[in-house]
Amino acid sequence: MPLSAPSAAATVVASGAASPRPNAIRTAAGLRFCGLRREALGLRSSPQAVAARRSVAAAATAGNGAAGSGGFDYDLLIIGAGVGGHGAALHAVEKGLKTAIIEGDVVGGTCVNRGCVPSKALLAVSGRMRELQDEHHMKSLGLQVSLPGYDRQAVADHANNLASKIRSNLTNSMKALGVDILTGIGTIVGKQKVRYGKVGFPDNEITARNIIIATGSIPFVPKGIEIDGKTVFTSDHALKLESVPDWIAIVGSGYIGLEFSDVYTALGSEVTFVEALDQLMPGFDPEIGKLAQRILINPRKIDYHTGVFASKITPAKDGKPVLIELIDAKTKEHKETLEVDAALIATGRAPFTKGLGLENINVVTQRGFVPVDDRMQVMDADGNVVPNLYCIGDANGKLMLAHAASAQGISVVEQISGRDNILNHLSIPAACFTHPEISMVGLTEPQAREKADKEGFEISVVKTSFKANTKALAENEGDGLAKMIYRPDTGEILGVHILGLHAADLIHEASNAIALGTRVQDIKFAVHAHPTLSEVLDELFKAAKVKAAGVSLSVNEPVAA
């Protein structure tokens, strides 16, 4: 999931959850889908290998004029060194482009420093604690465990150390490849021109043939909520784990709120969700959401209020608790006041685009988001493309996930290098790292039905249970469901949703199938090792029925895009 802070031109970076990127794969339509590489994992390339790659890429692009400075300081300048900016920079170097990246905070942005990475460290601890605390589960495996405990500071250090390590790896990977890392706040001052610098120091002005905005997002805090960073805080503060409150309210039940409820309840807190919509987890497929509530909410020390706004939240002070005033989401009438030890504000994220100088190039943001077309090209106030200017990640609002930002950045570099590329956002997976995990790709069932009604086709739904999977049963982790929505006339996969053990890892077979246009009637012939959790998806694909005669292709025949 589903997490924030400043980057480059200002402060934050492209968010959500970071993810490695696969090698580029070319589809029949000529589009490319790309994704992490060895350098980001701390495996450096030799200077000779770097020079060789640049030479090959320069030669390959010489015909279209994409490479070569042409009087510019850089071929590509990226504002923001988060996961999106990093992914774009590495791919640009591979393409032989002289590349620089401006960062006003720290390399890695939200995901590495205040989001995906440290949150996964905390969730790793909560997973171990849950396992050790589940006496029935342990006994069923023949294990005896004494009462588990934890060291709060050591847990916090684990998250901080992981973030530091990944941040160092990302920095070193760019330096090793020859990316210039420029420190300061970046502002666009004109066509293909950026000024950057640190407070108290002279500014520098540089030019670039192409510019990518990758400044990400920050936590969104609604009006009426007072943040003190100690008793009322956002995910930025929560990841430091400076305390474990006895009772904490979490405002918002999306990815961020759900993951933190997993952490806090495992460490002994009682949790109260405050959700503005009428049901918890509104962003999930409804069927998955209901099952998640039965598994992740009901058995734990969690209660909830739905259909209400937190109109005012006052931090604890002078011996008084945190006060949360709730009003009805529809009538706006006061409902009640909660008194808790702490409140985590998990109401989503807002783009960090202030100070970019967009007014200098006639660009007007929409609710803070930079308007872009399908190719991530920035659009001006008149609806025209701004030449040589792109925006990726949370700053454009298309899909606020770290790996989406990286994929968008790679797509942009492909275009800069002369190869048209349109990213299929419906093929980008998402995951919530609770215990068990939730993952998804494509459309939910209601979304698919709406699309089918509008376009005049039928949909079918198939499901499989983790209770029928040998590996899940061996782990005594049979709670879970996989669900696929598809077109029975063509076999097109519209969406896949999983709740269960390692769901975040399992989703990629489905997301790659959607990205590559693989149909159900073809992927059902894929072989899965036994006994593995991957057989959950194997059974899911095999359960699908395609009506149209003659549609099915042989297992080795390529699928036309």
Image (cartoon, helix red, strand yellow):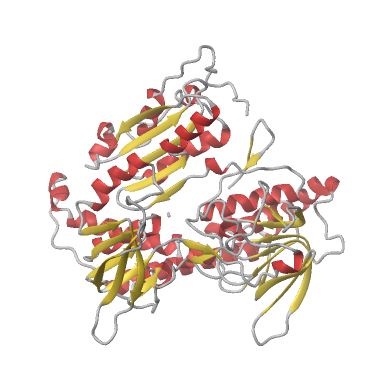
Q: Nearer the viewer, residue 146 or 411?
A: 411
Image quadrant containing the N terminus: bottom left
Q: At which x and y percent is residue 446?
A: 42, 37
Q: Is residue 122 left or right of residue 269?
A: right
Q: Residue furthest right?
A: 71
**Residue shown at the point (25%, 34%) measured from the top left:** 467
Q: At which x and y percent is residue 53?
A: 72, 52
Q: Is residue 146 above or below residue 505?
A: below
Q: Nearer the viewer, residue 430 or 304?
A: 304
Q: At which x and y percent is residue 314?
A: 33, 77
Q: Name which quarter of the figure residue 70 lies in.
A: bottom right
Q: Is residue 227 above or below residue 68?
A: below
**Residue shown at the point (48%, 67%) measured from the top left:** 113
- Tell me, yes or no, if residue 157 can be seen here: no
Q: Name which quarter of the figure residue 319 lies in.
A: bottom left
**Residue shown at the point (59%, 66%) measured from the top left:** 172
Q: Nearer the viewer, residue 295 or 538?
A: 295
Q: Residue furthest top?
A: 549
Q: Is residue 281 left or right of residue 558?
A: left
Q: Is residue 356 left or right of residue 279?
A: right
- Tell me, yes or no, if residue 402 can be seen here: yes
Q: Is residue 195 above or below residue 490?
A: below
Image quadrant containing the C terminus: top right
Q: Name which quarter of the figure residue 473 lies in.
A: top left
Q: At which x and y percent is residue 498?
A: 37, 40
Count of all numbered marks drawn on residues in the image: 0
**Residue shown at the point (70%, 47%) measured from the top left:** 414
